[in-house]
Structures are given as structure tokens and as C-alpha cells.
């Protein structure tokens, strides 16, 4: 397969499929749109598999690199590559897209072609975000990602969708614009937009602090970190199921990825100086947002807050600067991608039948939907970090890393194992167990083969990663160590 | 022969005026075609006579270089496109008289002279030829009170601006002893000129330029004129003249007054900041799309000035890229208003865009691209326009202004998003089929796709602008 630009294929194939969906399946031709979208998304996943099979885990640097001049006026290159940090995120994204397409198969009835196309195009763009090694290219993908999501929330979302869509867009745009200023500053300093060139660029402490904060605003909004998380519950609650899945599973990871790819290596001294600040924000997210999740009456909102709390773990792992913490953060990202995606799909399964997300409207669902209850049980356990599920692996590694740094950080972080179990299982109990609460629940039917399919795929992922997480951390190892060596070196002169 | 295109256009104009006398309304298509053909011939003539190095003629009053070629080509293309967009619009509003086309061509001629002027007198001549034609075009619907008011305001404030400009030019003449831009430059460089008189002159010149560009605090005419004019004329005022105005600003400031960059750049900082602030914040409160786009124009002019005020070759080429992109986006935006309008109905309220995605997904998509481009969201070309002016301004150390600019563009994003919201998230209140001629629809689609394609591959246009500016920089 030499000579085939694999990374470009992974980006552009879903986008091309999205355009084809728009061109072939109008509103009158919904089935055609669904079929083409499914074919396109599966093909998109298949072309990403060679990334895994051909990836060399011993090399720390970028692999499958593609460089073409793009905008010579500003020395911008079409520069792509993956390393151990981005590889899993790309694969996770490619896996999520077909699941989202299947999940929207029957549920979406209005403007099917546009819905499917938006997800396919977004999938390609997000792959671009993870692969871009040129910061302007990264920025273009980063912002382009907002457009399909904005449309998805606004067109197919719930009653308050317009507010949520505009809040989502403006919130994230604010962060990105400051990042753009930082990128232009770095370009003016170094004469290049190459991210890898920035790693070697010496910067004064003042410059590093400014750059760190410019990136911080961009990435913290995306993660989202407390206190800039308020867009997420709104966006999640209003988005259609597919939109929530992609938001939680993929979009949030983009922020954490940004910290690893930009903030840490470009401004290492500022990162060290401000690590206390970052750890504090992360712990607030873990503990405080955990409490907030406890009192939610809306299932989607509860899972949204639990996402923020789990992402607090990721940023915590990143800013304690040791290998196990960083790898734990990455494993937690992948795991959270699978688990939160699955949780939102489960809520979607219920919502499609009952058109309610209120916990109080449910009760005794297990009597009517035993198979569904089993799946939901597994994912809830994973969400609360039960050993044997993927949720445990990442959280345990981060706590271990934190313990090396400071006992009390580890102690506070570990409380999530209690709170996480509390809010997830309490919700599960109220929704699934007990006597059948009303006639709507009485009328419920168990999951269809289509729903079984996407839940089973995620269940295999969650269990597989929980029982045998080694292949995941193995591929990251070289890149993470390289990153940490780099971050340990000062850039001051 | 550097001025061939101007001479050809003048002859063609004379022919069109006479031919138009002989055709009656149903055959007005002839005038339209003749106008298009003259613009096409001008395009060919301009490209055929272009040269990379500057060529002077008419005793140094007229210059032709790569920048003039690119900008003139931009003027022809945008006027040609806007005439196609407005054909059915002006027909249904009995504006389709010969005057519309001849005045358009006179304005084009004025712009060409402005773009190629190498002397303050030629500049002024071109400016007035263009402005007088535009005043008359605004007033073409004589029995409309709004249009008459708009024309009056435009004329009075335009005349005031011309007065300021002339006053400033006379100061510069007094200080340097010449109206020729190159000689003015030489005199300033020699240090012989009285700096007080020069700076005094610059203040008036910048004020006059501010009026013509529509930069705050000289912007008062823009919303009323944009709103009051027939949409076809609004589009005319909003697109091609900005290209000419850019050339005009560049000729005076960088051509003649480059050594005084420190003095005029400070003034432009204020104009730029205020334009971005007032334009973006006021636009939020508008319910009329034409008024909203008027304020959006003001904010775009603020961004354009951001490129110019950096006073470097990078900054000028970024500004040139910006103005070309701006013209492309404006054409699309107003083109869409005209496409959605029909006899007796102006689609110029925001509400008229409700549910466009249900009525016509393709047109909604085109408008979506245009709006995201105006907001500066990649992968549309509007992003690169903003990006390159920000880069130039940051490079010259205007960090505070750059941060202000991104904050204002965030505010700006809100009202562009609102249009997308209306088109995609709301249901239609108006289910009439989309009128408009087939050619206008196809062209509008191409216009929208161009915004996207130039966004994916911006290199060629950027490089063209950079080369043009480098070839015509006499101030360096």
C-alpha cells in the first residue's frame, strides 16, 4: 500500500461520502441516503484500520506523514501525521461514525440526507483535527468542525435547540479566536506554521504564559473544564442522540488532545508553572461537578455532567506530568469515548420510545426491556469505573499517577469512584428497577436488532478495553515518553 | 497602450447610449447584452495591455501596473455579475431603463480612472465620475421617498467628503509643490516639505478617505443609503466601488505618504477600531437585512484598514485580498436578496429568510457559505481574509487592536449565525417558489462555491495580491 496517502483518505473519504449523500438522496430518497451514508461510514472505518496494523509502536515521532505545500504565501503546508497520542482518537472517531449512522437510521425522519451528510463530513473534519501537523491546517479543521455540529443541534435538536446551538457555537468560537492570535504570534516568531517547529522555538516566560492562556481558553472550553463548561449541558440536552454521542465521544477529546499537542510542548515552562492552577480546576470538575450530576432529574443532563467530571480526570492526568498519568488520561479519553457514547445511545433508545428524558417518568423498565437493561447495566458500571470495564483502567492509572505527585490530589480524585457510582447507579436504579411505574413503561418493547448491533459493538469495546488495556497503552508509550521528555526541558534562554 | 480599456469603454458607452434610444422596453435586453459585451472587451483589453512593471502615460497622470490590472478585472467581473443578478429585479421594478446600464458603465469608468490614477487630479476626477453616477443611480426610483432621501444624504455627505479630500490635497500640494504622487513622495523623502502642513493635510485626506470607505466616525451615510436604494443599486455601491476605494487609499497613503506612515497609521488605528466596534455591535440590533449588511460593511472596512494601517507590503497585500474577497461575498449576499425578491416583494427583512432550507436547500446552503465566510469561519475564504490582515497587524505590533478585532468578529459571528438559524432552524412563513432568472441562480451557486473553493485553495489569489502589491509599491 505504499504510495497511498492513507491519512488523506481517512479525512476525505467520509467528506466525499457526505457530499455524495447530499447529491444522491434528497428528502424524497431517504433510504438511499441512509444506505450511502452507512457504506461511506463503514468504508471510512475500514480505511482507518491499516493505521493500526501498520503503526510502529517503537517510533515516538509522527508516522504516515504527508507534506504538500498548501498556502506558500504563509509557508503553510498540508502536513499530516499520527503518533501514539492521536492514533487511538482517530480510530475512535472512525468507529463512532457508523454507530451514529445506524443509531439515526429510523429515528431521524426529517431531512435524512442532510443529517447523515453532516455526520460524515464532521467525521472527516475531526480526523483532520487529530492528524494536522500544521497549525493553520489544524485551525481550519478545528473551526470547520463547528459548522456541522451547529446545524445538527439546531435542526434536529430539542425544543430549546436554537439557544443551545448558538451558545455552543459562540462559546467555542471565543476560545478558538484567541488561539488564532497565539498561532499568528508563533508564526511571526518562527516563520512557520509547523507545529513541530514550535516545539523547538525558545520563548520567554511572559510569552509562554500568554500563549498558554490563549490555548487554555480554546481547549478548556472544548474539554470542557470548570468554569467554562456551561455550554455542554445545554448542547447535550438539546442535541439529537447522534449529536450527543459525537459531542461526548469525540468533540470533548479534541480539547484534551489540544493540551497534549500544543500547550504542553509549546509552552512547557508555563505549563509547569500553572500546573497547580490546572490541577485545581480539574479537581473542581471531578468533585463539584460530580455533586451537580447527583441532583439532575434529566438523564441526558446527568450524563453530560458526568462527562465533565470524567474529563476532569483527563486534564488531571495530563497536568501531573508523569507517564502513567498521561497514559491514563489517554486511556480515559478512549474509554470515555466508548462509555459516554454508549450511555447517550442508551438514553436515546429510551427517548425514542417514550419521548422523555426525565428520570421520574421511568421506573421498572427492566421488566419490559431485559436485554436493554443488561446493556445499560454494563455501561453504567463502566461509567462508575468498575474494575473489568474500560472506565476503571483509565481512572486507576490517573489516580496512580496522582499518587506519585501528591497524596491529597489522588485522594480527591479517587472520590469520583464513589460519586460516579452514586449518580450513575442511582439513576440506573430509578429508571430500570422497581415496579412498572406507568402505562407508558408498560407499553415498552425491547431493543431491535439494529439497536442491539450498536450497543453490542460498544459493549465489546468497553469490556475488551477493561480486561486487556495493554495494547492501548502499548501504542502510546513511545510518544508519551517523548512528550514528557520534551516537556521536562525548559525553553527559556 | 496602457489606457486602452478606458478609451474603449468610453466609446462603447457612447454607442450604448445611442442604441438605447432606439430600443423600447421589451427589447432592453439588447442594452444589457451590449453592456456585458463592453465589460468583456474591457477585461480582454486590460489583460492584453497589462504589464508587471508600472507604465505611465498622459504625462505621468495615469499608471498601469499589475495591481491596476487585478483590481480592474475585479471591477469588471463584479459589475458584470451584479448586472446579471439584478436583471429580473430591475425589470420587475421598472428600473430597467437605459440609464441604469449607462450610469453603471460611467461608474465603472470612474473606478478605472481611480484605480489607475497617478496624480491627485486624476484621482479626484475618477472619484467624482464614479460618485456622481452612483448618486444618480440611487435616485433612479424618483417616486420613492426613501430612495430620494437616500440619494440626498449620499450626495450631501459625499460632496462634503470630496471637499475635505480636496482641502487635504491642496495642503499636500502646498507643502510639496506637486500633485503628482511620485513627486509628492520624492518631496517628502527629501525632507524639504513643511511637516506641519503635511500632517494637517493628511488629517483631511484621511477624513475624506474615511467617508468614501465608510469607516466610523464617517459612516453615517452607509446604513441609510444601503437601506434606501433599490437592492440592485445597493449591491453596486457595496461591491465594485470598494475595490476602487482601496486602490485610492493605497495610492495616496502608501504611494504618496509612505514616509509619514507613523502619522496616518495612528489615525487609521482609531478608524479601524471604531468601525469594527460600531459596525459589529450595531448590526446585531438590525431587523432589515440590507441595514444589517450595511453595518457589516462598516465592520469589514475596519478589518480592511487593519491591513492598511500596518503600513507594510504584507499588510497591503492582505488588505487587497480582503477587499477582493469582500466584493465576492457582498455580491453573493445581495444577490440572494434579489433572488428571493419578486414583483412587489422585497426579501430584505431577516424574517424573509425563515425556513429557506425547506424551500430551497441549495440556495440555503449557498447563503450559509456566504454567511460563514463573512463571519470569517474556515473553511471559507472569509477566514483567510481576516487571518491575513490579523497576521500583518500583529507583525507590526498591534497586539491590542488584534485582540479587539477577534473579539468584535466574535460579536459579528452572532448576527451572521442568526441568518443561518433563520434559514435552517425555523420553519418557513412564506412558501412562494423562488423567482429569479436561471442564469442568476446558476451564477449565485458558482458565487457560493467560489467562497468555499477559494477557502480550500486560497494560495493563488493570495499570491496574486502579493505580487501585484510588490510590483506597484513606489513608496518603498
Image: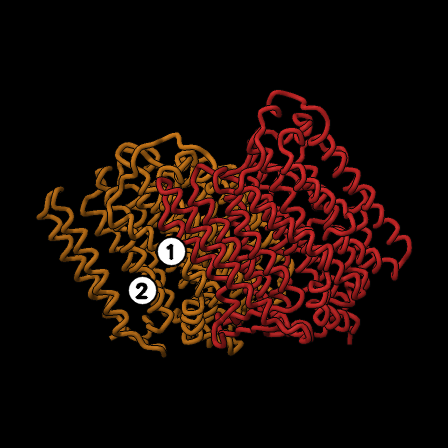
Location of residue B50 with respect to A467 vertically, above or below: below
Residue A202 locus on image (x, y percent): 72, 74
Disc 2 residue crowd, few under 14, some 14–19, many 20+, Cα 10 Å:
many
Mark number displayed over residue A165: none
Q: Are marks 1 and 2 in contact (CB under 8 Å)?
A: no
Quarter-of-image position of residue B181: bottom left
Q: Chain coloured red: which letter?
A: A
Quadrant showing the N terminus of chain B: bottom left
Q: Chain coloured orange: which letter?
A: B
In front: A282, or A213?
A282
For the image shown, how many numbered marks are present on the structure? 2
Q: Which residue is mark 1?
A: B449
Disc 1 residue crowd, few under 14, some 14–19, many 20+, Cα 10 Å:
some
Q: Secondary structure at mark 1?
A: helix
Residue at (70, 56) in percent of width and height: A465
Does label 2 lie on the same chain as label 1? yes
Alpha-carbon distance for marks 1 and 2? 20 Å
In front: B99, or A214?
A214
In front: A156, or B384?
A156
Residue A153 locus on image (x, y percent): 54, 41
Q: Chain of mark 1?
A: B
Residue found at the far left of this picture = B22
State left or right for residue A82 relative to residue A152: right
In front: A273, or B461?
A273
**Residue B382 appears in the picture as rendered:** yes
State left or right for residue A425 relative to residue B150: right
Residue at (23, 65) in percent of width and height: B42
Q: Which residue is mark 2?
A: B73
Amino acid at each position: 500500500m505504499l504510495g497511498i496517502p492513507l491519512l488523506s483518505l481517512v479525512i476525505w473519504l467520509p467528506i466525499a461520502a457526505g457530499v455524495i449523500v447530499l447529491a444522491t438522496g434528497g428528502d424524497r430518497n431517504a433510504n438511499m441516503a441512509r444506505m450511502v451514508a452507512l457504506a461511506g461510514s463503514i468504508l471510512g472505518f475500514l480505511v482507518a484500520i491499516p493505521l493500526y496494523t501498520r503503526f510502529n509502536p517503537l517510533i515516538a515521532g509522527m508516522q504516515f506523514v504527508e507534506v504538500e505545500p498548501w498556502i506558500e504565501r504563509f509557508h503553510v503546508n498540508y502536513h499530516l501525521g499520527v503518533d501514539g497520542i492521536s492514533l487511538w482518537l482517530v480510530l475512535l472517531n472512525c468507529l463512532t461514525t457508523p454507530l451514529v449512522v445506524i443509531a439515526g437510521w429510523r429515528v431521524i425522519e426529517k431531512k435524512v440526507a442532510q443529517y447523515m451528510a453532516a455526520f460524515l463530513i464532521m467525521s472527516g473534519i475531526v480526523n483532520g483535527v487529530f492528524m494536522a501537523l500544521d497549525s493553520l491546517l489544524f485551525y481550519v479543521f478545528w473551526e470547520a468542525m463547528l459548522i456541522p455540529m451547529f446545524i445538527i443541534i439546531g435542526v434536529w435538536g430539542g425544543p430549546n435547540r436554537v439557544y443551545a446551538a448558538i451558545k455552543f457555537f459562540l462559546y467555542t468560537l471565543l476560545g478558538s479566536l484567541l488561539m488564532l492570535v497565539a498561532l499568528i504570534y508563533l508564526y511571526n516568531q518562527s516563520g512557520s506554521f509547523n507545529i513541530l517547529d514550535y516545539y523547538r522555538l525558545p520563548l520567554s516566560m511572559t510569552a509562554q504564559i500568554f500563549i498558554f492562556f490563549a490555548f487554555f481558553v480554546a481547549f478548556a472550553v472544548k474539554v470542557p473544564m470548570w468554569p467554562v463548561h456551561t455550554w455542554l449541558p445545554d448542547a447535550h440536552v438539546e442535541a439529537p442522540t447522534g449529536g450527543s454521542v459525537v459531542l461526548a465521544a469525540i468533540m470533548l477529546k479534541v480539547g484534551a488532545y489540544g493540551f497534549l499537542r500544543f500547550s504542553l510542548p509549546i509552552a512547557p515552562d508555563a505549563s509547569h508553572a500553572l500546573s497547580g492552577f490546572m490541577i485545581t480546576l480539574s479537581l473542581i470538575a471531578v468533585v463539584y461537578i460530580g455533586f451537580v450530576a447527583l441532583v439532575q432529574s434529566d438523564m441526558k443532563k446527568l450524563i453530560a455532567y458526568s462527562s465533565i467530571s470524567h474529563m476532569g480526570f483527563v486534564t488531571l492526568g495530563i497536568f501531573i506530568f508523569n507517564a502513567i498519568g498521561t497514559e491514563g488520561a489517554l486511556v480515559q479519553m478512549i474509554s470515555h469515548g466508548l462509555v459516554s457514547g454508549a450511555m447517550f445511545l442508551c438514553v436515546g433508545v429510551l427517548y425514542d420510545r417514550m419521548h422523555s428524558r426525565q428520570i421520574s417518568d421511568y421506573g421498572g423498565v427492566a421488566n419490559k426491556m431485559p436485554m436493554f437493561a443488561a446493556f445499560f447495566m454494563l455501561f453504567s458500571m463502566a461509567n462508575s469505573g468498575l474494575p473489568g470495564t474500560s472506565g476503571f483502567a483509565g481512572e486507576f492509572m490517573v489516580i496512580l499517577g496522582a499518587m506519585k505527585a501528591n497524596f491529597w490530589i489522588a485522594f480527591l480524585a479517587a472520590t469520583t469512584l464513589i460519586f460516579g457510582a452514586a449518580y450513575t447507579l442511582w439513576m440506573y436504579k430509578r429508571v430500570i428497577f422497581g415496579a412498572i411505574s406507568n402505562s407508558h413503561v408498560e407499553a415498552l418493547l425491547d431493543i431491535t436488532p439494529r439497536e442491539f448491533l450498536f450497543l453490542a459493538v460498544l459493549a465489546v469495546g468497553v469490556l475488551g478495553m477493561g480486561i486487556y488495556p495493554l495494547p492501548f497503552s502499548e501504542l502510546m508509550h513511545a510518544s508519551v515518553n517523548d512528550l514528557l521528555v520534551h516537556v521536562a526541558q525548559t525553553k527559556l534562554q | 497602450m496602457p489606457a486602452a480599456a478606458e478609451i474603449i469603454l468610453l466609446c462603447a458607452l457612447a454607442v450604448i447610449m445611442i442604441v438605447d434610444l432606439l430600443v423600447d422596453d421589451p427589447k432592453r435586453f439588447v442594452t444589457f447584452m451590449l453592456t456585458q459585451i463592453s465589460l468583456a472587451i474591457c477585461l480582454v483589453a486590460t489583460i492584453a495591455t497589462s504589464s508587471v512593471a508600472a507604465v505611465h502615460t498622459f504625462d505621468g497622470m495615469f499608471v498601469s501596473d499589475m495591481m491596476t490590472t487585478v483590481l480592474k478585472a475585479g471591477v469588471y467581473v463584479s459589475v458584470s455579475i451584479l448586472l446579471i443578478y439584478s436583471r429580473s429585479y430591475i425589470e420587475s421594478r421598472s428600473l430597467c431603463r437605459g440609464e441604469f446600464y449607462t450610469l453603471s458603465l460611467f461608474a465603472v469608468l470612474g473606478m478605472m480612472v481611480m484605480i489607475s490614477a497617478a496624480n491627485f487630479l486624476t484621482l479626484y476626477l475618477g472619484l467624482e465620475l464614479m460618485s456622481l453616477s452612483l448618486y444618480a443611480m440611487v435616485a433612479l426610483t424618483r417616486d420613492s421617498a426613501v430612495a430620494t432621501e437616500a440619494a440626498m444624504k449620499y450626495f450631501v455627505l459625499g460632496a462634503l467628503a470630496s471637499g475635505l479630500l480636496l482641502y487635504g490635497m491642496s495642503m499636500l500640494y502646498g507643502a510639496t509643490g506637486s500633485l503628482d504622487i511620485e513627486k509628492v513622495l520624492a518631496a517628502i523623502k527629501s525632507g524639504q516639505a513643511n511637516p506641519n502642513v503635511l500632517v494637517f493635510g493628511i488629517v483631511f485626506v484621511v477624513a475624506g478617505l474615511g467617508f468614501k470607505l465608510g469607516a466610523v466616525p464617517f459612516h453615517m451615510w452607509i446604513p441609510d443609503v444601503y437601506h434606501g436604494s433599490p437592492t440592485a443599486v445597493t449591491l453596486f455601491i457595496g461591491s465594485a466601488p470598494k475595490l476602487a476605494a482601496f486602490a485610492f487609499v493605497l495610492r495616496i497613503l502608501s504611494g504618496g505618504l509612505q514616509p509619514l506612515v507613523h502619522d496616518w497609521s495612528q489615525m487609521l488605528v482609531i478608524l479601524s477600531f471604531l468601525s469594527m466596534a460600531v459596525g459589529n455591535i450595531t448590526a446585531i440590533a438590525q431587523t432589515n437585512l440590507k441595514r444589517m449588511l450595511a453595518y457589516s460593511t462598516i465592520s469589514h472596512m475596519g478589518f480592511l484598514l487593519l491591513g492598511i494601517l500596518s503600513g507594510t507590503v504584507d499588510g497591503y497585500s492582505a488588505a487587497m485580498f480582503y477587499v477582493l474577497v469582500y466584493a465576492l461575498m457582498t455580491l453573493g449576499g445581495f444577490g440572494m436578496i434579489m433572488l428571493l425578491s419578486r414583483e412587489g416583494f422585497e426579501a430584505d427583512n431577516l424574517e424573509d429568510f425563515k425556513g429557506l432550507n425547506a424551500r430551497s436547500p441549495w440556495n440555503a446552503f449557498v447563503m450559509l457559505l456566504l454567511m460563514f465566510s463573512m463571519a470569517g469561519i474556515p473553511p471559507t475564504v472569509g477566514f483567510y481574509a481576516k487571518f491575513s490582515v490579523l497576521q500583518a497587524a500583529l507583525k507590526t505590533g498591534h497586539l491590542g487592536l488584534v485582540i479587539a478585532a477577534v473579539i468584535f468578529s466574535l460579536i459579528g459571528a452572532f448576527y451572521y449565525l442568526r441568518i443561518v438559524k433563520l434559514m435552517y432552524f425555523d420553519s418557513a412563513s412564506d412558501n412562494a417558489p423562488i423567482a429569479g432568472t436561471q442564469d442568476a441562480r446558476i451564477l449565485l451557486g458558482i458565487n457560493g462555491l467560489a467562497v468555499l473553493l477559494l477557502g480550500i485553495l486560497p494560495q493563488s489569489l493570495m499570491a496574486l495580491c502579493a505580487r501585484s502589491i510588490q510590483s506597484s509599491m513606489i513608496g518603498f
